[in-house]
Image (cartoon, helix red, strand yellow):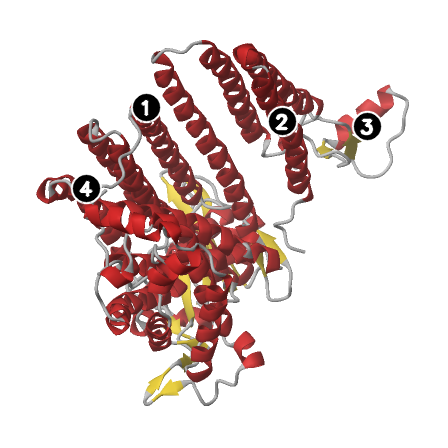
Amino acid sequence: MNHYAQHVKKKIRHWTDKEILRQTPPETKRHISLVQRMTELSSSLGLSAFYVTVFSCLYLFISETSYMESLPVIFFLGSSTLLTTWAILIGTKITEGRELSGLWRRVLLLPAALLVGSATYGLSNYLMVSPNFKFSHDVIDTAMTNKVGDVMLVAAGHPTWDAYLLFFAGLFLVRGWWGVADSYRRKKLKISSILWSGLLSGIWVAFFAFPLELALFWSVVGTASAQLASTWTPPRDRLYIVEDR
Amino acid sequence: MNTAFDPTLMKNLLLLLIGLVPLVLFGLGVYFLCRMFPQQARLVKVLGGATFAIVVAIPVLLLFYVGGAHSGSGVIPGEAHHVSVEIDRGQLELAAAENDNPVQGSPQLEIQSEVISTQTHRGIQTYQSARGVAAIVCLSLVLATGGVIVWLLYRSDKFRIVASSLLVGLFGFGMLVVLGIGLKLLGTTLLSESSLVSTSTGETIQVQHPGELLAFLTSSATVYGVIAGIISIITAFAVYVYLVSRKPVERQRSGNLIESAMWALPVLFISAMVLIQFMNQQQPYDDQLMVDIPVAKVDLKPPHGGFGEGNLLETSNDLLPDQLKKKVTPLPTDVTAGNELVSTVNLEYPDWINRGDAMLLSDPENVSVFRFTVMSDLFDTNEAAFNDALQRLSNRAVTLFNKTRTDSGITTIPEELLTQSAIIHTFNASGLVSTGQNKFPMYRVWLDCELSTLPDRQPYQYWTQVLILQRMVKLASLIGFFVLMFVALSALFRLNHFSQRKFEKRLKLAYIILVLVAGLGVMSVNA
């Protein structure tokens, strides 16, 4: 343990956990070695597959169709959510502990969002799963939001490639994902964070047409899996505080 | 109701949960006894371990072997087995006369018995073999675990580290085998579900899967087995490294970046190859391809049906497939060796043959429906000629469907589906063919066919189901590969850290071997 860390340990000895958490937000600049980053990242990526599988298999409980009809949907939901979670985990792990503004952290996730959007669209074709707007139309009227300028977001009742790109760009830009997956977040698993992700994606879908159930699934399950899979440093183990550096 | 909720499965799970409770209580009991009598702790542990092994082994034995023997024949209870035996009427009358028992009605005996012929059983359970393997694996695991627990608690030298590692490797292998059996059962369920194709009228047709699909799934299972074996060996090694290492230091330090990068190169290379191979299979779908189906130009209207002048015996139009297969043209009575028959049958081809064998759009506005004609070769029975035409139709169907999705894994469509939905008209001709001194009738069949890539058409529906099944296996193997890579990488870093780099090179080598084997396995599945 270096001198600074000993100093911090000594300083926070009499602090409450709440005070430590206040002093160690996810944006705290700190030194994280490459090996540690890689160790934590690879663990998170592996663990997230487990959580995403579990959450995706819950679809079996609401599905009333046969295995042959349910499994492609589960595969689509699972693989696309896994891609989303991996993108979030990788993006946040790269920027973790670095001195970057929130805007930069969001912008750096944008290429990942476009990749995930394209891959998810490809997966829906690959597994021949055709998301539609039946559920969305019960909640939101997409007549006004099905195009942006000349770009169509809905074609023949299905979301277009542009719709996928736009949705994921929005999901990755609007939500501050570093607060979800950073090891200095307030809690290991925060329910309000999951609900907030769901709410934001719902609001996004209200303005830019996209199947609501998919949007909610990806945002909610993605947030939950990212939180569960990523490392979390308990308050007493935090070696860096924001005010000193 | 969702088929996922299998009551038998739920019952077994409940039994498993109920069985776990006393085991946990037993473990707690041993723990508290050890705390209460610390000087007798070793004896308590030994006795506890032995009791645990015996307690677990007995129900497993009873469940798998005694229960399995009880259901012995593998016949679903309550299912009557009707075996129809057709015998000659003369034999039947003779038998009846001998028994002084007059026979009435049809000469078809309906014999109801428990088991007469294994070929007629539809109730044979397909899970028998899987359950047997699971039983052997479980028993081996339980006995090995119990034995080694006793031994480990009794001994206390360094050698037990090796034993523990092997035990963990064995246990991991057992878990992977059980997981594999579960996946196999899921695959069986999917195969049986995908063999049912529903018609537009709500009926379902059961089809037989082509052999290549079954071969694909079998090869996937073999690859899984090999990778599971490698994972187990490397897991055992990882546990060994963990156990011989000291406690971790507080912080992790980076090693030499260039050296690490060199070690990472093979892994990156393999993962890139896996990804590129997967991506290469996905070709963009192009509407224009649909209207450009290359076919070999065949003369569908050979003179005299291809039998030679004066040799045509008979033609028939629009017979149903079953009638067509059974139709036999008798050899004319005036045909003898060396005697030339001059037939007076005129061959008039139906109008639909004029359309030719080009896969034309029957509806120009709809690029999904194609109409064309196929013609068989000459065969000695109508059935053989019909099957030949059907095979040509199947090839055409696959060619057409492959235009929509390029990575199809099958090259034949089950004939039941084609017969049911793709044949619009039939035409057949029979004629005399002579080889030296012999003359005999041969047959040729023409089929007017319609194929469509509309989702509700049965051949396309089946083809799509099989394609999705194969794609799910491929996607699962791809995701599994990357997850394995990440998990193993995490284990590598952590173990390297725990062992303070004592085993660094060996760990890296093990990691590369694991990724290499898994990558080659995935590529062979996706090939």
* Residue B397 is at least partly visible in this image: no
Residue B39 sits in quarter: top right
Along the line of sight, the residue nearer the viewer: B107 or B275: B275
Q: Quadrant of residue B468?
A: bottom left
> Is the residue at mark 2 from the same chain as the one at mark 4?
yes
Instruction: Give whichever of discs 3 and 1 has the lower sequence position.
Output: 3
The disc labelled 2 sits on which kind of residue?
Leu
Q: Amino acid at mark 1?
A: Tyr
Name the residue nearer the viewer: A130 or B30.
B30
Name the residue beneath numbered marker 1.
B240
Question: Closer to the N terminus: mark 3 or mark 4?
Answer: 3
Above or below, comparing residue B33 to residue B273 in the picture? above
Contact, mark 3 vs mark 1 (Cβ under 8 Å): no
Q: Is residue B493 above or below residue A199?
A: above
Please give left or right for residue B343 compared with residue A108 in the image. right
In this rendering, do the residues under marks 2 and 3 share a single chain?
Answer: yes
Label 3, secondary structure: give it: helix
State the residue position of label 2.
Answer: B23
* Residue bearing the label numbered 3: B93
Image quarter in which the N terminus of chain B is found: bottom right
